[in-house]
Amino acid sequence: MSELTAHHVGVTVDDLERSVAFYRDTLGLPELARFTVGGEAFAKGVGIEGAEASFVHLDGGDVRIELVSYESTGGSPDGTDDEGGAESRLDQAGATHIGLTVDDVVGFYDSLSDDVETISRPQTTESGTTIFFVRDPEGNLVEVLST
């Protein structure tokens, strides 16, 4: 049996260009590829009838960050679900986030523009890791850390 290795972390977004701008311009992740996928095999593979999606892969170092926007589906860009549920939180079952390392967490935090939503200032945890979280333009959580 083959061993599994990480290839990408996928984040479904509503506004692909706004999200690409955040991950590329604000977080500094280089864009690797853009492509669109549709057709019967894709729709069956993702379990969504008539699915078509646009993808952008960004270089996250050891793993790609895959931003994907579906033409046939979509969530709310304000972080709520169709029933008006709350934004994702780290203490909720099923919560996800992307973790990105940087040499100088405080310097990176200080370089962010005022319009980037942060959860807190950088904090050094009991384990010695310095962390802070931001939300991308659609409410997805991104952890910036150094060890």
Image (cartoon, helix red, strand yellow):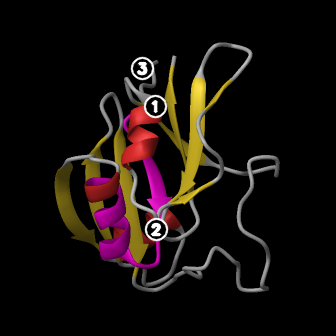
Which mark, residue 105? 1
Q: Is mark 1 in CB contact (under 8 Å) with mark 3?
A: no
First along the sequence among labels 3 and 2: 3
Count residues near mark 1 (Cα–Cα under 10 Å), then give few for <14, some for 14-19, many for 20+.
many
Three-letter amino acid code at the position of disc 2: Asp
Residue 123 is left or right of residue 2, and the answer is: right
> From what the image shows, is residue 2 above or below residue 98?
above
Q: Secondary structure at mark 2?
A: loop
In this rendering, the answer to whether 66 lies above or below 40 is: above
The residue that disc 2 covers is 115
Residue at point 59%, 36% (across, down): 122
Closer to us: 20 or 33: 20
The amino acid beneath tag 3 is: Ser
Q: CA distance from mark 1 to mark 3?
A: 36 Å
For the record, the magenta segment spans 6-24
Q: Counting residues from the N terminus, which is met first, the one under dot 1 or under dot 3?
A: 3
Please tell me whether mark 1 or mark 3 is closer to you in this view. 1
Task: Give residue 9's position: percent from left, percent from top.
Answer: 45, 45
Residue 7 in magenta stretch: yes
Say what secondary structure mark 1 lies in: helix
Q: In terms of depth relative to the viewer, which is nearer, 91 or 134?
A: 134
Q: Is residue 108 left or right of residue 117?
A: left
The residue that mark 3 highlights is: 2
What amino acid is found at the position of numbered circle 1 in the picture?
A: Val
Q: Which of 8 and 77 lies nearest the eye of the viewer?
A: 77
